[in-house]
Image (spheres, rainbow, N blue to C red):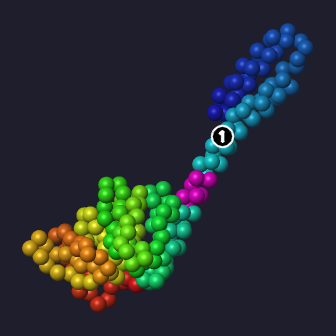
């Protein structure tokens, strides 16, 4: 950019000096004026672009810090709120942790099934179950199937059927399947007396 700037200044100054007849303008002051103009033309857009990208980075860092503060470092008792963020890091849905029944995958979306005035309701969140698992698995939302996460607070019982293990919820008629690949982890979780979930 520096070489391009010097080249532009030199060409512009020589052309302006030549067009003026070569005598009425002095080349050094003319070059200085053209240099200042070109610096402004080159510098201002680049500074604005840099500040714009930096502002975006800082916003993303702030979102990450907010998530870390509200999710990772604080325990989530049943009475405390749980916040769900979309793929862009924007807060989309918040409810009491105990209200969340289960989360169901739907392509790039996740259906959050929760209690609303003692009735089951659904919120469609633009985020994947895989990303939700990374953020909430240590808080009591347990992955039990390729398409499901369940709130362990609301699991009434686990039973074996001919098709495999299922989880019954205390506030929903829905039975949540446990796939073979998750059976060992789910069984170990509910068999353990000392899990790290604060609910």
Looking at the image, residue 187 sits to the left or right of residue 10; the answer is: left
Q: Residue at x 85, y 9 (%)?
A: 21
Looking at the image, residue 129 sits to the left or right of residue 95; the answer is: left
Residue 59 point in image, percent of width and height: 58, 58
Image quadrant for the C terminus? bottom left
Residue nearest the viewer, comparing 108 with 131: 108
Compared with residue 1, is residue 13 higher up or lower down, i.e. above or below?
above
What residue range appears in magenta?
55-61
**Residue, far top:** 21
Compared with residue 138, is residue 23 higher up or lower down, i.e. above or below?
above
Residue 126 point in image, percent of width and height: 41, 57
Compared with residue 191, is residue 176 higher up or lower down, i.e. above or below?
above
Q: What residue is shown with label 1?
A: 46
Residue 24 point in image, percent of width and height: 90, 14
Instruction: Examine the structure image and report whether residue 59 is included in the region drawn in magenta.
Output: yes
Residue 197 point in image, percent of width and height: 37, 82
Q: Residue at x 72, y 33 (%)?
A: 41
Label 1: state its secondary structure: helix
Decide if residue 186 is in sight here. Answer: no
Residue nearest the viewer, comparing 10 with 163: 163
Residue 11 occupies quadrant: top right
Instruction: Examine the structure image and report whether residue 62 is included in the region drawn in magenta.
Output: no
Residue 2 occupies quadrant: top right
């Amino acid at each position: 950019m520096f070489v391009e700037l010097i080249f532009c200044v030199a060409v512009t100054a020589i052309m302006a000096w030549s067009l003026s007849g070569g005598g009425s303008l002095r080349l050094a002051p003319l070059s200085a004026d053209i240099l200042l103009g070109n610096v402004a033309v080159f510098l201002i857009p680049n500074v604005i672009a840099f500040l714009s990208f930096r502002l975006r980075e800082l916003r993303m860092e702030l979102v990450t810090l907010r998530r870390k503060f509200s999710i990772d470092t604080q325990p989530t008792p049943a009475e405390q709120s749980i916040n769900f963020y979309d793929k862009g890091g924007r807060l989309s849905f918040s409810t009491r942790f105990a209200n969340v029944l289960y989360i169901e995958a739907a392509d790039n979306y996740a259906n959050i099934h929760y209690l609303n005035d003692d009735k089951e309701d659904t919120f469609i969140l633009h985020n994947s179950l895989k990303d939700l698992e990374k953020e909430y698995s240590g808080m009591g939302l347990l992955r039990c199937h390729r398409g499901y996460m369940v709130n362990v607070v609301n699991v009434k019982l686990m039973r074996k059927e001919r098709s495999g293990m299922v989880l019954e919820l205390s506030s929903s008629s829905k039975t949540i399947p446990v796939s073979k690949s998750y059976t060992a982890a789910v069984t170990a979780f509910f068999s353990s007396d000392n899990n790290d979930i604060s609910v």
